[in-house]
Image (spheres, rainbow, N blue to C red):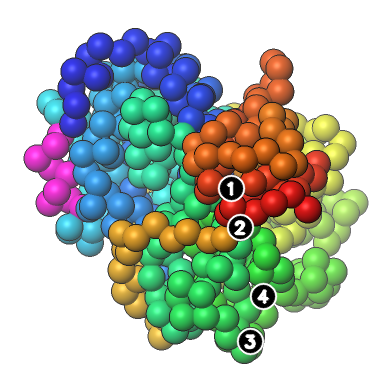
Amino acid sequence: MNDVNIIDISADQISTHVKDAGVVGAGGAGFPTHVKLSAKAEIVIVNAAECEPLLKTDQQLAARYPDQVVKGLSLSMKATGAQQGIIALKAKYKDAIAVLEPHLTPNMQLAIMPDIYPAGDEVITIWLTTGRRVPPGGIPLNIGVVVNNVQTLINVANAVDGKPVTTRTLTVTGAVNNPITVTVPIGTSMHDVLELAGGIDKDLMYISGGPMMGTLITDLSTPVTKTTGGLIGLPKEHPLIKRKTMTVEAVLRIAKTVCEQCSFCTELCPRHIIGHELSPHRLIRAMNYKSIGDPSLVTTALTCSECGVCEAYACPVGISPLRVNIALKAELRAKGIKYHGELGKEDPMAKHRLVPSSRLMDRLRLRPWYKEAPLSLKVYEPDEVTLKFQQHIGAPAIPVVKVGDVVRVGQLIGEIPEGALGAKVHASIEGSVTQITPQTITIRKGGAAK
Ligand code: SF4
Ligand code: SF4
């Protein structure tokens, strides 16, 4: 770690570098990191839990680049004024633990979490490592904490060295021929990424992200973004694929006809057990008998993390409170309705209600696909990339180049609109800009404008 850099640089300069490099939360929805680092916090947590079954990106990056992870943590602590740094990971990440330990400074510690799902949900990570509880509808900063994942912190460390975010590391696994963890320029198509893992198999369907929270991809020209967590191929008849292809109408019909009100979904809901009002079985009841109950109850759907425990693990009859919540959230957000509620008492049995990852793996019938996906150190170079102007929470970036321009790797191509929350976008390969749409920009290696 280059201590001189960290001592010499001010908190404002760190945030500016991070903003200029286009760093966003790599493990979640892509909240612009410079905004997080501009706030004041007591604790910075590195979320290295990586609790989605099958994904092996952060654990390998932490083992390979411990100095960059710790540098990113030091910079985040300096930017936010935090006095404590915590690297939260699981005991089974032995390689990462062994190499991180010698790099820690006296104000940093490793926090070893149980191998449970969703240890990587930042609200649960904070609770497991500090005992603090984020209020429902709140954010970690409300309780003095900032959380960033491993890849985000590596990007923070690079940002201060003047390197913008131009690549993404992701695990490509499942039933693919050659499970692997690869680094690709942002904007590489899923099609090209699959070629690196042994090619496309027409008997498979593909999930972008993890098995629990990922989404089905129907178009393999979909580009990798700053937040693409993984790419998983599974047979079309796999229960997980069937569940993800079920229509909302079918989900609601099943919820209406077979819910036994057993409340297992609520007893195991990670948000409920730490004292949030969210009770999925009550939401299912409210949906089914619209005339009964408190209308404000429905707004608790807004506090659902979409972890999927209720759907994939808890419900004995195949109902998806998760999908019901997603539908409710869309409706509530469209009407501009917000949740207003207090943090309640923690379930005294909370720690015993967490879902062991190995049981989840069996329940999801993923055991046959649990394979090594070794980290390749080669950065793949596609002939063409298509970068989205919106890979983050906030306003889409606006293009600052035009069709026909020749761009180099790391050159700014999308700027944050004046006064808006957003993130910059940079060219990820060298070449010519061949197309610009309201949503995307395409760059072709050595290509001429269309
Ligand atoms: S676990 Fe399933 S059956 Fe039981 S209350 Fe929840 S949705 Fe209904
Ligand atoms: S997806 Fe289900 S288990 Fe997870 S937070 Fe939402 S309601 Fe709770």
Residue 244 x %, y %:
67, 71
Give coordinates of residue 105: x percent, y percent: 14, 28
How far apart, in angstroms, are the residues tagged by discs 1 and 2? 8 Å
Question: Considering depth in this image, is 303 or 204 the residue closer to the camera?
Answer: 204
Front residue (pair 114, 15): 15
Q: Nearer the viewer, mark 3 or mark 4?
A: 3
Whichever of callouts 3 and 1 sits on the residue coming sooner in the sequence is 3
Mark 3 and mark 4 lie on one chain; the one further toward the N terminus is 3
Residue at the extreme right of the image, as rendered:
291
* The magenta segment: 96-104
Q: Residues within 10 Å of mark 4 (few under 14, many from 20)?
A: some
Q: Can residue 259 be seen? A: no
Q: Amino acid at mark 1?
A: Gly
Residue at the spot of label 2: 384
What's the CA distance linking mark 3 and mark 1?
A: 32 Å
Disc 2 residue type (three-letter):
Glu
Q: What secondary structure is found at the residue carrying circle 2?
A: strand
* Comes first in the chain, label 2 or label 3: 3
**Mark linked to residue 243:** 4
Q: Residues within 10 Å of mark 3 (few under 14, many from 20)?
A: few
Circle 1 sits on which residue?
431
Looking at the image, tell me whether mark 1 or mark 2 is earlier in sequence order: 2
Left of 118 or right of it: where is 444? Answer: right
